[in-house]
Structures are given as C-alpha cells and as structure tokens.
Amino acid sequence: MGIFSRFRNNIETRKNMEMLTSTFRLLNGYSPVFTTYNSGLFEMGLTRSCIDKIATQCSKLNPVINGNKNYKRLNTILQTKPNRIMTTQQFLYRLVTILVVENNAYIVPIFDNDINRNIVGFYPVRAVGSKIVTHKGVDYLVYKIQDNEYVIEYEYVGSLKRHYYKKEYVGESNEAIHSTMDLIDTQEQGIKEGIKSGAMIRFLARLGVVQNAESIKNEQKRLKEDQLSMDNNGGILIFDSKFADIQKVDSKPFIVDKEQMDLIKNNVFDYFHISEAILQNTASEDQWNLFYEDVVEPIAIQISQVLTNMIIKFTDIEKGLNVVLESTKLQFISNTTKLNVSQQLFDRGILSTNQVMDIWNLPHVEDGDKRYIRKEYTEVNNLDKEGSEEDGKQEPDNGNSNDGNEQETSNNEENKNE
C-alpha cells in the first residue's frame, strides 16, 4: 500500500468528498488563495540561494519529545523517518522551504486508521492548492498531494505561518518582494540582450549608391560570405566601389551598474533576513549566531510548538511535556567556543558526555547520557554555615592525648632530680 493511500482515511467523510469541496462556505467570506511570484520565487537564482540556506540550516535541527517514555515511538518517528519517503532532514528541509516560499505550510498527520487515529507519521503539505473551509461548525483543510485532493479536520493539522497579519488562518503573500523580482528579471534580460546585440554587430558598411531593400540584403549577404567568413584567413578586407566605407564596431559587453546590482541584492537579503556572507559561507561566528537567532530559531520554535500541540495531550503539556528542536547539529561555532561551552556546561551537570560529543560531531560513548557535577560547588546561602562548621571541627581523640601529657610531666620531674 502506497504512502498516499493513508490520506484517504484521514476522516470519515471521505465518501462525501464532492460535497465537501463544492458546498462548503468559505471562512469569514474570503477564499485564502496561495500563490507564489508569477515567474517563480524559487526559480530565481538569488532567492533560491536564500531559501536553500535557511531550509538547509533548519534541516539540521533534531526534534525531540521531552518528558515521558509513552511517546517513545513517536519520538523515534520524528527523529528518523516521519513518513515512508522522507528522512527527518528531508522532511524539515521541504517543510521550511514551503514555509519560506509560500509563507504558509501544513503538517498533516498520518493515522493508522479512522477509529483509533493513532499518529504513525507526518507529511509536509504545500499551501498552494489548499483551502480552509467550514461545514456545520467544523473547520476543514482541503489539500492536494500529487494532484489528488484530500480533506482533514483543521484541528488535527499543524499550521505554520510567516508574515502573519491580516487573515486569521493564513500569512500574507510575498507581494512585497515582487517589484524586486521584476528588477532581477529585467536585469538578467538586459544583460542577455546586451551581450547578444554586442556580439552580433561587428561591422558597419555604407552603400555608395541607393538601392532597394532586396539589393541591400543581397549585398550584405555577399559581403559576409566573401569577406567576413572563416575562409578569409588572410585578415585582409577588400570591397568594391559599391561601399563608401566599412567600419569595425568595437563590441563591449553590457554590464549592469554595480550600485544597482547591490541595491537589488540587498533588497532580497533584507526580505529574507540573510547576508551575503551567510550565502557564501564566509560568515564569522558572530554573524552566524545572529542568523541563527533571527531566522533559524523563530522557525524552530514555531515548528516545535505546532508539533507539541499535534502530538501531546493537553494534560501532558501541563506536566511539562513538549517537542523541542535541538540545535546541537548546527556546527557553526569555532573550536575555541566549542571548548568553552563543553567545559563550562559539562562539569555543571547541564550537558552529558554524549551531548558534548554531539557538539564536536563525534560518536556517542557507552554510559554517555550520565551527567556530572563538580563537588566543590555549594549554594551561596550556605557559605557562612559551612564555614562555621569547618571552624568548629576538632581533631578526633584517639585516647593518646592524656598519655602524651603524662609522659611530658614525668620527663620534667626526672630532670629536676638530676
């Protein structure tokens, strides 16, 4: 049975698919239509590089369910294979790519059956082609996978949003960057056409006599074949009296002004909150930390909260259970910082041995999940108390102190008699 066959069993109303997609009234009277830039936001080289960098870094995150062994199976699914055709890295990469490109993305749970509805997997769904509808007071998500339409109650779905402002259920479009995309497209076309025109016209020739269009075309062809072809390897151009003069055109490539190029690039960088140093892997440690805090971390928090609400019961959430996207695989810090972090957090019991191994990208060791702490640490409020206890301590009496005094007195008396 293929992976997509399970989506048909998401809700009991699957038999009424035609009714669901045709008679539902739209929420709040509007239809949330998802579209990308006409020429493709993901098709432009610069914007794709920005999207790829964000999705790649987010795909290094490690989803973990904290707090209860009852979710061990789901924890394994999240960390290894969310569905039959995706690894965790692939799942996160595609999910974040959809989110950044379309400003909306959905995580649809895969159930074992309609009765128990135990989650056995997760699948990232595009917002384009999806719509949110309501029927008899229940909200539904109608979505497409491989041109097939499915439907599921909205309460079971994980919904991710960017530029969340006007609409209740969806984020805004990428219309704000369309003008910049037009400039990039115009810029690329201008460079292409400029190079073509500069390479095509190499000579200018003026006919000495007036001729019709057909005669001019024939003379142009004759001059090209006789004098400007590869057969003329002598380097000498000879023309008769029909041509008044022939001048060579100095062809120069068309180059867009650097300031204009930088302006367009900076508009893209500002929109995606990314820098050229991040794209070219030349960023310093501080630049990487800023990129993580400004771009990666907010996405990680949103995904972790969405998965928490999808997977964990509310009673367990109240007890502190949650899904966390760990960032131990984001290896962008220097070795000096890694050493300081490992040393300072390990001997305080914050990191285990295996967590330190993750920082250094090393394999786990046996009993590596144990935590250690330095014994000389104590609470600040207990400093005076422990100090007084140390002062009040006495050496143990082994019964030899009196014997020593008696021996000393005896020796003194013997010296006096002598």
Image (tube, grey):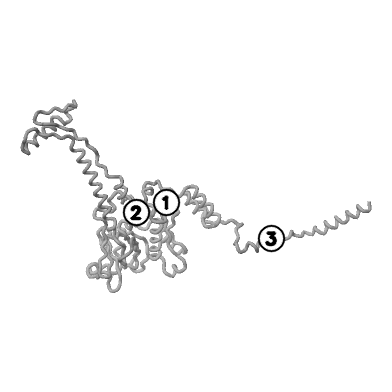
Res 110 visible: no
* Residue 23 appears left or right of 71: left
Which residue is at the front of the view, 391 or 319? 391
Q: Which mark is residue 351?
A: none
Q: Position of residue 382 (x, y in %)?
A: 62, 63
Q: Position of residue 32 (x, y in %)?
A: 27, 64
| Residue closest to the far bottom | 136
N-term-proximal mark, 2 vs 1: 2
Determine crowd level at label 2: few under 14, some 14-19, many 20+ residues with C-alpha closer than 10 A: few
Q: Nearer the viewer, mark 3 or mark 1?
A: 1
Q: Position of residue 330 (x, y in %)?
A: 43, 52
Q: Amino acid at mark 1?
A: Trp
How far separated are the C-alphas under marks 3 and 2?
A: 61 Å
Q: Which mark is residue 390?
A: 3
Determine crowd level at label 1: few under 14, some 14-19, many 20+ residues with C-alpha closer than 10 A: many
Res 163 visible: yes
Looking at the rendered structure, the secondary structure element under dot 2 is helix
Determine crowd level at label 3: few under 14, some 14-19, many 20+ residues with C-alpha closer than 10 A: few
How far separated are the C-alphas under marks 2 and 1?
A: 16 Å
Q: Which mark is residue 270?
A: 2
N-term-proximal mark, 3 vs 1: 1
Q: Quickly name the residue at label 1.
A: 288
* Residue 319 appears left or right of 109: right
How far separated are the C-alphas under marks 3 and 1?
A: 49 Å
Quarter where residue 63 is shown: bottom left
Looking at the rendered structure, the secondary structure element under dot 1 is helix
Q: Amino acid at mark 3?
A: Glu
Name the residue at 40% across, 46% down.
282
Q: Amino acid at mark 2?
A: Asp
